[in-house]
């Protein structure tokens, strides 16, 4: 069964520093996609970054990068140069290619607080 | 700005009321989703439509009734709700139902905050 584990319920980071949010996953499907979403207190779920299981390079999107270690089944999100507006809840999610069409598995989330 | 728009942003309703949540997307996506999210929890899938047909119903109580009038619109009709149904309701869409090896991102709207009194 597919599973996402986010072991950090809460994280603090100083403004302008980098922070890593952990995500490990489990699936029996050899093809899958991993996603990170940001959810501020306003409620909107904002898509940040995507990594496919066959992608050779780690995904990057501006200040966001995904540290993908397939053998370890981890897909950690790295946020560089943190800003106050990065304070939010962050969810790691997975979708399988060959099974569970239409369904995503989400982790429990990590609440990130950026300190000035 | 999100390309999935939801209305209303906030809704307060009594247990005997009938109301609807609305969702619209103009990205040409063929799959649309309703999720329910309680505070500090991940979103839970409720319904999925693919090409305007209901594909997934995650055993949702019949007091929630989805409707997909066309490929851009998705409604969630609410009737005789309970206080425990108070939550954030998120609409989402994706290009297709199937993940695909090249990725198929699900994009969410801003959500509708529902309070049942």
Image (cartoon, rainbow, N blue to C red):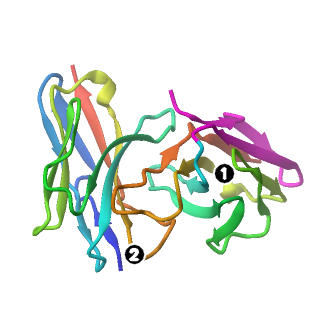
**Place of residue A15 in the rendered image (x, y in percent of width and height, measured from the top left):** 18, 23
For the N terminus of chain A, give its image quadrant.
bottom left
Query: What range of the chain is rendered magenta?
Result: B1-27
Q: Nearer the viewer, residue B42 or B33?
A: B33
Residue A105 among those drawn in magenta: no
List the residue tagged with mark 1. B86
Q: Secondary structure at mark 2?
A: loop
Answer with the quarter of the image where residue B34 lies. bottom right
Where is residue B20 shown, x and y percent of the image?
80, 47
Horizontal side of A63 relative to A36 (left or right) equals left
Q: CA distance from mark 1 to mark 2?
A: 34 Å
Relative depth, front residue between B43 and A31:
A31
Q: Is residue A116 left or right of residue B81?
A: left
Q: Is residue B39 above or below residue A94?
A: above
The label shown at residue A114 is none
Quadrant of the drawing holding the C terminus of chain A: top left
Circle 1 chain: B
- Residue underneath mark 2: A98
């Amino acid at each position: 069964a597919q599973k996402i584990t986010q072991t950090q319920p809460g994280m603090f980071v100083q403004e302008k520093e980098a922070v890593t949010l952990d995500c490990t996953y489990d699936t029996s499907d050899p093809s899958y996609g991993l996603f990170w979403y940001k959810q501020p207190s306003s409620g909107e779920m904002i898509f940040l970054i995507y990594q496919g299981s066959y992608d050779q390079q780690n995904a990057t999107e501006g200040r966001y990068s995904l540290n993908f270690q397939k053998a370890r089944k981890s897909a950690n999100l790295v946020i560089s140069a943190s800003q106050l507006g990065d304070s939010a809840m962050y969810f790691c999610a997975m979708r399988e290619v060959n099974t569970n069409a239409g369904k995503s598995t989400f982790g429990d989330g990590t609440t990130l607080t950026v300190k000035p | 700005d999100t390309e999935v728009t939801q209305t209303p942003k906030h809704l307060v309703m009594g247990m005997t009321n009938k109301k609807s949540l609305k969702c619209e997307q103009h990205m040409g996506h063929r799959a649309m989703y309703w999720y329910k999210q309680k505070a500090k929890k991940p979103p839970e899938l409720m319904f999925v439509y693919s090409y305007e047909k209901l594909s997934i119903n995650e055993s949702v109580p019949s007091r929630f009734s989805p409707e997909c009038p066309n490929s851009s619109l998705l409604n969630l009709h609410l009737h005789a709700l309970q206080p425990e149904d108070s939550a954030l309701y998120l609409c989402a869409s994706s290009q297709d139902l199937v993940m695909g090896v090249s990725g198929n991102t699900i994009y969410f709207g801003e959500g509708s905050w529902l309070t049942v009194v």
